């Protein structure tokens, strides 16, 4: 659709940013809802990120998403943080206020939980312990959101134990850090298994995890979505566990930002999934 001089503007800042599927995602919503607006990729090197973020109000942008490697820098640059971003230590969504102030938000945890609820109807965080593998930025959002949703316990496992202990200390709450060698033992009694690492992604080795001890009732999810069904999800499916792929986390985390910038609450549909996966 054509845009006018009054178009509402937003975008995504990253380095590199060419791989981002967010322009395709938001572009689909803009067209579907007939909104006079644009969402553009903004390739910003690390040494210019603060300058670029500060320029958003002057350029007439309503805000932007922030992706790798800028989430921590954005957290330090914005004028104010919502409670979730403050806790995460990272920002993935910036909203320009009516007063021109920059508000940093983090919607990754929201996207993760909404994807689980959609992909595994009836799932509840309170169903039992969760086993989370990895201790990077994605794991931080996953662990915090699970605790906020009522998970009784989160087992956190990472090859480097010190990194997992740092994450647990930052987030607080019912988190137990376990050694990598005990990862399969912890599956016994787990209600949810989450892989937040890049293992299983195209070009990466599969996650080294034997699922034999996992209850048949447990849900298994992977934040990777290339391929859509990773070796972990394939193994879980083969033994009868419900699985949730990672692309829904990307789709759902985008909803709050779109609503803030363009004034419409968007829906995640099968058509949207197809459009984004085709990109």
Image: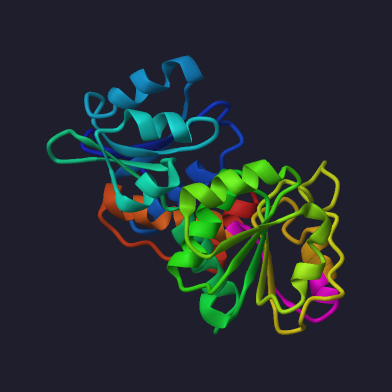
**Magenta extent:** 236-247
Query: How far from the left and from the top, in percent, is residue 224?
Result: 68, 52
Rendered view: 109 above or below 210: above
> In terms of image quadrants, where is residue 143?
bottom right
Choose between 5 and 131: the one closer to the eye.
Answer: 131
Query: How far from the left and from the top, in percent, is residue 127?
Result: 57, 82
Position of residue 165 in the picture relative to residue 188 (left or right):
left
Choose between 226 and 146: the one closer to the eye.
Answer: 146
Position of residue 115 in the picture relative to residue 209 (left or right):
left
Q: Could you tell me which residue is drawn at 34 percent across and 18 percent down?
A: 51
Asked whether residue 132 is drawn in magenta, I would say no
Q: Is residue 148 visible?
A: yes
Tag count: 0
Rendered view: 267 above or below 13: below
Query: How far from the left and from the top, in percent, is residue 151?
Result: 52, 72
Q: Could you tell me which residue is drawn at 26 percent across and 25 percent down?
A: 59
Choose between 226 and 47: the one closer to the eye.
Answer: 47
Q: Could you tell me which residue is drawn at 66 percent across and 53 percent down?
A: 196
Residue reaching furthest left? Answer: 99
Residue reaching furthest top? Answer: 47
Asked whether residue 243 is drawn in magenta, I would say yes
Q: How is the image coloured?
A: rainbow
């Amino acid at each position: 659709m054509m845009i006018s001089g009054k178009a509402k503007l937003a975008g995504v800042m990253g380095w590199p940013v060419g791989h981002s599927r967010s322009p395709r995602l938001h572009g689909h919503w803009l067209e579907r809802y007939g909104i006079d607006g644009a969402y553009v990729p903004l390739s910003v090197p690390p040494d210019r990120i603060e300058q670029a973020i500060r320029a958003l109000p002057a350029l007439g942008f309503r805000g932007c998403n922030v992706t790798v490697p800028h989430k921590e820098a954005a957290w330090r640059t914005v004028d104010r943080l919502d409670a979730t971003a403050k806790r995460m230590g990272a920002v993935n969504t910036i909203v320009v206020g009516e007063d021109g102030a920059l508000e940093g938000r983090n919607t990754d945890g929201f996207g993760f939980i909404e994807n689980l609820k959609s992909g595994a109807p009836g799932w509840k965080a309170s169903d039992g312990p969760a086993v989370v593998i990895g201790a990077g930025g994605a794991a931080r959002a996953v662990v915090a959101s699970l605790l906020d949703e009522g998970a009784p316990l989160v087992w956190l496992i990472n090859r480097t134990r010190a990194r997992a202990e740092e994450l647990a200390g930052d987030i607080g709450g019912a988190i137990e850090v376990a050694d990598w060698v005990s990862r399969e033992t912890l599956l016994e009694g787990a209600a949810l298994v989450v892989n937040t690492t890049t293992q299983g992604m195209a070009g990466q080795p599969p996650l080294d995890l034997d699922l034999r001890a996992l209850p048949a009732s447990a849900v298994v999810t992977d934040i990777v979505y290339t391929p859509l069904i990773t070796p972990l999800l394939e193994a879980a499916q083969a033994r009868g566990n419900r699985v949730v792929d990672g692309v829904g986390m990307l789709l759902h985390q985008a909803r709050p930002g779109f609503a803030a910038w363009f004034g419409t609450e968007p829906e995640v549909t099968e058509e949207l999934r197809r459009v984004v996966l085709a990109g």
